[in-house]
Image: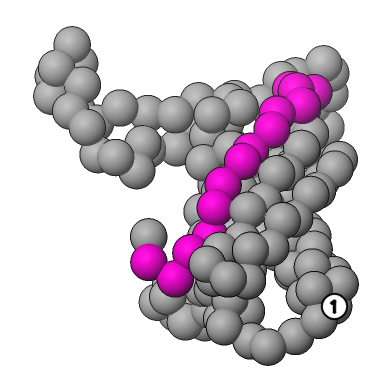
């Protein structure tokens, strides 16, 4: 039996060639601030700002915080109270950050990562340098993970 196609689907047999196309990344601003210049809609993050917000969200999210995605996030808060050797803890944190970005953020790749532990205050500082793909921008994110945000 021959496959019957509508007139709109006949173009599916041909291949379109797209070159040098830059993809625009966008996301909503998680502050949910109103953009009064645009019919009271919320602000949007674009390009590097959208990816940076997503990477920060990944680092600060713990497992089981996101509904229906129990393994989403780096789950770093749980490490703050573990009694472990500094070198082992820093290496574990690095692996978690690399893994979570590789798994959940295909728009970015890690260029450099520095982790600073302050066990006395149960605080972790992260300085992450990452490349945003398709727009070829390198950005830096500095954030702190504490038990209380």
- Does the magenta run of residues contain 144? yes
**Mark 1: secondary structure:** helix
- Residue that sits furthest to the bottom in the current view: 83
Decide whether the magenta segment is chiefly helix, strand or loop.
Answer: strand
Quick one: quadrant of the N terminus?
bottom right
Where's residue 53, x and y in %?
Answer: 51, 41
Q: Which residue is mark 1?
A: 88
- Residue displayed at 66% across by 26% down: 23
Task: Reply above or below: 105 against 39.
Answer: below
**In which quadrant of the rendered view does residue 4 lie?**
bottom right
- Does the magenta run of residues contain 110? no
Task: Reply above or below: 99 against 37.
Answer: below
Where's residue 66, x and y in %?
Answer: 43, 72
Question: Which segment is the magenta one?
Answer: 134-148
Quick one: quadrant of the C terminus?
bottom left
- Residue displayed at 62% across by 79% down: 79
- Closer to the camera, 10 or 38? 38
In the rendered view, how is the structure colored?
A: one colour
- Residue displayed at 81% across by 48% down: 113
- Residue displayed at 58% across by 71% down: 120
* Left or right of residue 142: residue 135: right
Task: Reply above or below: 123 against 49.
Answer: below
Where's residue 71, x and y in %?
Answer: 59, 79
Q: Can see residue 78? A: yes
């Amino acid at each position: 039996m021959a496959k019957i196609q509508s007139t709109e689907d006949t173009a599916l047999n041909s291949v379109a060639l797209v070159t040098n196309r830059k993809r625009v990344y966008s996301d909503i601003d998680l502050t949910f601030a109103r953009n009064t210049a645009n019919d009271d809609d919320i602000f949007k993050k674009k390009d590097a700002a959208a990816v940076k917000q997503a990477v920060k969200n990944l680092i600060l999210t713990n497992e089981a915080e996101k509904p229906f995605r129990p393994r989403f996030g780096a789950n770093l808060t749980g490490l703050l109270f573990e009694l472990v050797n500094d070198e082992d803890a820093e290496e574990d944190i690095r692996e978690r950050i690399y893994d979570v970005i590789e798994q959940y953020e295909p728009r970015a790749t890690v260029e450099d990562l520095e982790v600073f532990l302050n066990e006395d205050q149960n605080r972790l500082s992260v300085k992450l340098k990452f490349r945003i793909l398709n727009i070829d921008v390198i950005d830096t994110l500095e954030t702190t993970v504490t038990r209380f945000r």
